[in-house]
Image: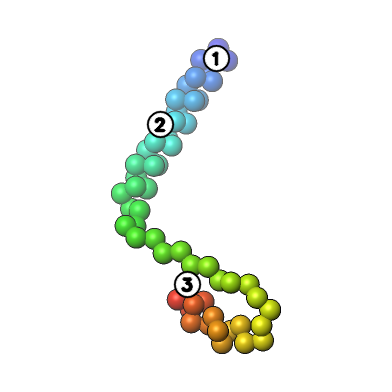
Amino acid sequence: MKKSFFYFSTVLLLTTILTVVVQAKETWPEKLTFGVIPVASSRNMSNSFGSLVQHL
C-alpha cells in the first residue's frame, strides 16, 4: 500500500512538473537582460549609477 502510494505520488509530481515546464516555456521571453550594480564606497554613487538603477 505504501509503495503504490509512493509511486503514484512520484508520477503525479513528475507529471505536474513537466506540465508547468512546458507552459512556462511558451511564455518565456526571447531575450533576458541582466544587470550588475557595482559596490564601492563613493559619495556620488547615486549620480554615477542612477541611470542604471532606473533602467533596471
Q: Earlier in the sequence, mark 1 or mark 2?
A: 1
Mark 3, mark 2: which one is toward the viewer?
3
Mark sitting earlier along the chain (3/1): 1
Q: Mark 3 points at which residue?
A: 56
Residue pictured at 49% horizontal, 25% vertical: 10
User: Residue at coordinates 34% horizontally, 57% vertically from top-left?
Assistant: 29
- Residue highlighted by disc 2: 15
The amino acid at mark 2 is Thr
Q: Is residue 40 left or right of residue 51?
A: right
Q: Residue 53 carries which label?
A: none
Query: In the displayed structure, would residue 42 be above or below residue 22?
Result: below
Residue lying furthest right:
41
Q: What residue is pinned by disc 1?
A: 3
Three-letter residue code for mark 1:
Lys
Q: Position of residue 48 (x, y in %)?
A: 55, 84
Q: Could you say whether the residue bearing mark 3 is in a helix, strand or loop? A: loop
